Amino acid sequence: MLTSKRLIAGAFALGLAVLLSPAAVHASGEQPELTDDIGPVKAFRIGARAYLSGDFLYALKALEHAAKRGHAMAMWKLGKMYAEGDGVAEDDQRAFDYFREIANAHADDNPHSQFASVYSNAFVQLGNYYKSGIPGTKVPQNYGEAARMYMHAATYFGDPDAQYQLARMYLDGNGVPRDPAQSVRWLYAAAKKQHVGAQALLGDLLISGADVHPRPVEGLKWLLIAKDRAGPADRDWVLALHFKAMQATTQDEQVQAQVAASAWESDPQ
């Protein structure tokens, strides 16, 4: 699915592309010393190359060198490493701090810039942390702050992950007043950007008619699309919703939904 995760991967790939150039490789084959005269872009290149080669300790030093000099991609990569325990000990507080630094520095940057998906993802990551809180730290669970992070990423950057998370908050009434109609609007926004979770949840809501006007053909259309696109992480729950939908719709509705899904797949809009 084409979500901000893939956009971020693309941005990170652009940042690494220079590593294919012989000029990016240290002539001696050894890791260069990270002196003060090494700028953030070069330090990021060095750190990324070390990360790809499995030298996580040196990668950490180089990425920190770049991050201290304001390199957003280095901050984001460090945040992800600490959040996932990727080559370092997992540390959600440090991850949070890196994402917050990106958000503070780039909240109003051009939403169509090369690294906009990285900036928007920092807001999504902050929203995720505020939604759950970080035990043992000064980051408590705060649904209102989570909604504020998602709202900025959803509206300013058009981030589909943020739009999906915001839709769930409106559906549950966490951090914002409960508003199923608003939830459906955000789900549509993310679904049209091929966010599988949004497509599946939207489909389920439209079929069940829970708090919204039921539209079984439209709902099943989105569930069919989600089923075809779901990856391993989403497949089980999407298939469960699809099975439930097939039990709740008529054969005629299923035929109409399949036609509508095929039409959308051939010309997403």
Image (cartoon, rainbow, N blue to C red):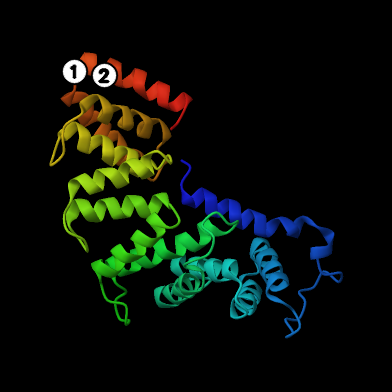
166 up-or-down from 80: above or below: above
Q: Secondary structure at mark 1?
A: loop
Give the class, few, some or many, for how many residues have Cα within 10 Å of label 1's Cα (few <14, many ≥20). Answer: few
- Circle 1 is placed at which residue position? 250
**Circles 2 and 1: CB distance less than 8 Å?**
yes
Name the spot of residue 158 as percent of width and height, x first.
43, 52
Indicate the secondary structure of the residue bearing disc 2. Answer: helix
Residue placed under numbered mark 2 in the picture = 254
Q: Is 79 left or right of 23, judged from the image as shown?
A: left
Q: Residue furthest right?
A: 27
Residue at (74, 58) in percent of width and height: 18
Query: Is residue 8 in view from this perspective?
Result: yes
In the rendered image, the quadrant that contains the C terminus is top left
- Whether residue 87 appears in this view of the structure is no
Q: Residue at 47%, 67% (x, y): give it.
A: 107
Examine the image and state in which quarter residue 140 appears.
bottom left
- Locate residue 67, reporting x and y percent: 59, 76
Number of numbered labels in the structure image: 2
In the picture as drawn, the residue positioned furthest to the left comes out as: 211
Q: Nearer the viewer, residue 32 or 201?
A: 201
Disc 2 residue type (three-letter): Gln
At 41% from the left edge and 26% from the top edge, which residue is drawn? 264
